[in-house]
Image (spheres, rainbow, N blue to C red):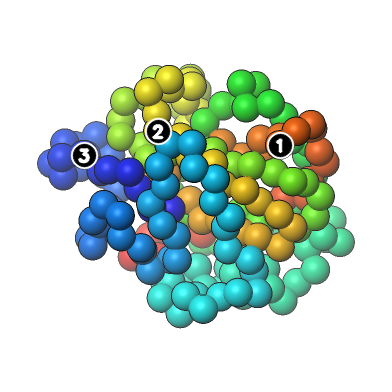
């Protein structure tokens, strides 16, 4: 996702040993096709069959999106499956959306999340950049789950991504995200997450 700001380069490198986009400029469009959000904006995310910018993505992320295009994951059995060992992992999840206040922001360090809404919904996903100013609620980054849950940050400039069946979003290690937010009422969703090892995207 695009970022609001990245903070001082040396300070960010000290807090998070995760590379940032080298071409970051406020208001610019990134090669993954997403634009910088501002607080409270609602954005439709990319539809799986509209991939005019797919060629600009790292090869590993291109393979993930291609897998989503070529497989009927709405009919796939739920569970966790290795697509390329621990370098690319498929998660097929059935869940219900919930009010934003009941959900925890999360981020990852070892993997990029490619999140795809296969069926159901609608769904919203909250997103804001990880600037190192959020309070940790539960840190599982050193476990196979590779996830850190934050407490809600009242100062975060959280944007909203509108998801519909067939749409996908990518979240990099510097992206805090809050999936499965309800729109008007709880809704059942079939959510697909392909976790792509970040070091294969460099």
Residues at marks 2 and 1, CA–CA distance in whole angstroms: 19 Å
Observer-nearest of 113 and 146: 113
Residue plotted at (25% across, 43% down): 6
Question: Do the numbered discs 3 and 1 sit on residues whose CB atoms are within 8 Å?
Answer: no
The residue identified by callout 3 is 7
The residue at the point 58 percent across, 68 percent down is 64
* 114 left or right of 156 in image: right
Q: Nearer the viewer, residue 31 or 92?
A: 31
Q: Which mark is residue 162?
A: none
* Residue 40 locus on image (x, y percent): 48, 36
Is the residue 43 above or below the residue 136 in the image? Answer: below
N-terminal-most mark, 2 or 1? 2
Label disc, if present, on residue 157 of the rendered structure: 2
User: In the rendered view, does 48 fall on the left or right side of 24?
Assistant: right
Q: CA distance from mark 2 to mark 3?
A: 14 Å
Q: How many dots with numbers?
A: 3
Q: Quadrant of residue 15?
A: top left
Q: Residue at x 52, y 31 (%)?
A: 105
Which SS class for mark 3? loop
């Amino acid at each position: 996702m695009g970022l609001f700001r990245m903070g001082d380069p040396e300070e960010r490198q000290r807090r998070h040993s995760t590379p940032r986009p080298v071409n970051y400029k406020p208001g610019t469009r990134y090669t993954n096709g997403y634009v910088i959000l501002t607080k409270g904006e609602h954005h439709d995310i990319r539809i799986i069959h509209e991939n005019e910018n797919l060629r600009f993505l790292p090869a590993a992320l291109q393979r993930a999106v291609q897998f989503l295009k070529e497989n009927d994951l709405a009919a796939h059995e739920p569970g966790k499956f290795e697509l390329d060992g621990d370098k690319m992992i498929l998660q097929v999840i059935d869940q219900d959306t919930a009010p934003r206040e009941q959900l925890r922001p999360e981020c990852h360090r070892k993997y990029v999340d490619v999140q795809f809404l296969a069926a159901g919904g609608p769904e919203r996903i909250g997103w804001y950049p990880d600037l190192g100013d959020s309070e940790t609620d539960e840190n599982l980054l050193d476990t196979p789950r590779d996830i850190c849950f934050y407490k809600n940050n009242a100062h975060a400039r959280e944007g909203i991504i509108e998801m519909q069946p067939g749409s996908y979003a990518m979240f990099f290690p510097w992206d805090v995200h809050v999936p499965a937010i309800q729109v008007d009422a709880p809704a059942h969703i079939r959510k697909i997450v392909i976790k792509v090892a970040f070091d294969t995207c460099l």
